[in-house]
Amino acid sequence: MITGLECPGCGSQRAIHELLHFRIGEAFTQNAVVPIAIPYIFLGIYLDLFRGKEKYPRLERFFFGKWAGIIVVVIFISYWILRNIF
């Protein structure tokens, strides 16, 4: 509120609420990163809880390795900048 800028997480709770009601378009208007991140989160849960790391070690390294972390950070920072420009 002080700067007038929106953080990358603004609207996340509203987006999750919209997704729970299967209103995907509305979820994108609240926060576009949340609907895109949901499959990524579910993949991480699968790999962690259902022995996916043992079955698919290359998949785990590809999506949750060092470079994947850097890419995720770049995406969030880019989204933060773009949502405040437009």
Image (cartoon, helix red, strand yellow):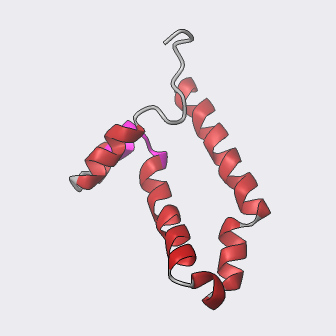
List x then y, in percent, for residue 37: 50, 56
**Residue at image location 57% in from the left, 74% down from the top:** 48
The answer to whether any part of residue 3 appears in the image is yes
In this picture, is 9 found above or below 64? above
Residue at x-position 50% and y-position 62%: 41
Q: Residue furthest left?
A: 21
> So how many labels did they put on this image?
0
Vertical comparison of 68 with 43: above or below: above
Locate residue 60, reporting x and y percent: 66, 76
Question: Is residue 84 located in the magenta-colored stretch of the structure?
Answer: no
Note whether residue 29 is visible.
no
Q: Residue furthest bottom?
A: 55
Percent x, y for residue 81?
Answer: 62, 31
User: What residue sits 50% from the left and 36% below the top?
Assistant: 9
Q: Start and end of the magenta stretch? A: 27-33
Q: Position of residue 20 (x, y in %)?
A: 26, 54
Residue 79's quadrant in the figure?
Answer: top right
- The residue lying furthest to the top in this view is 2
